[in-house]
Amino acid sequence: MSPENRKKLNALRKRLDILDNKLLSLISIRSNIVKNVLKLKDHKSEIVDKKRIAKILNNIKKKSLKKKIDPKITNRIWKNMIFAYIDYERRNFKKK
């Protein structure tokens, strides 16, 4: 890689690092909301809502196409996020 391209690469990576920090802040906010949602659930069976998951993924696909983002990327990100939070809810569910 040329020195000029190395410099450009480092600049782009710095921008990605800044963006990653912003994403972490949003994930923190989302996690707090999920904690509050979990408090409202009476039964462990309420953790997975397949209809809601399908609706979310469908909406993400539509929005991705509108914004010219590869929907396979956003689908994978959202599926992983959804299933990570389902796992979190299962691990933290307290019977009432």
Image: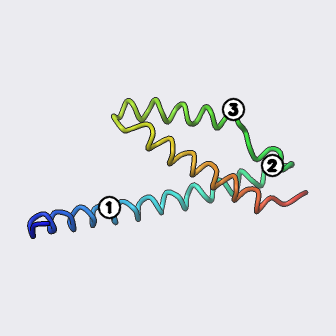
Residues 1 and 31: in front is 1
Q: Amino acid at mark 2?
A: Lys
* Left or right of 11 in this view: 52: right
Counting other residues with Cα less than 10 Å from the Cα at mark 2, is it few (<14), some (14-19), or many (20 or more)? some
Element type at mark 3: helix
Mark found first going from the N terminus, 2 or 1: 1
Mark found first going from the N terminus, 3 or 2: 2
> Which mark is on residue 41?
2
The N terminus - image quarter: bottom left
Residue displayed at 56% across by 36% down: 57
Q: Position of residue 53 (x, y in %)?
A: 64, 38
Query: What's the distance in space between the residues labelled 1 and 3, CA to CA?
Result: 34 Å
> Which mark is on residue 58?
none
Element type at mark 2: loop
| Furthest residue toward right | 96
- Label 2–label 1 contact, CB within 8 A: no
Q: Position of residue 64 (x, y in %)?
A: 41, 35
Residue displayed at 48% across by 33% down: 61
Residue displayed at 76% across by 47% down: 47
Query: What's the distance in space between the residues labelled 2 and 1, CA to CA?
Result: 37 Å
- Residue under pointer 1: 16
Element type at mark 1: helix
- Label 3–label 2 contact, CB within 8 A: no
Q: Amino acid at mark 3?
A: Lys
Query: What's the distance in space between the residues labelled 3 and 2, CA to CA?
Result: 17 Å
- Label 1–label 3 contact, CB within 8 A: no
The C terminus - image quarter: bottom right
Q: Position of residue 69 (x, y in %)?
A: 36, 38
* Left or right of 46 in this view: 4: left
Question: In the displayed structure, would residue 5 be above or below residue 75?
Answer: below
- Residue under pointer 3: 51
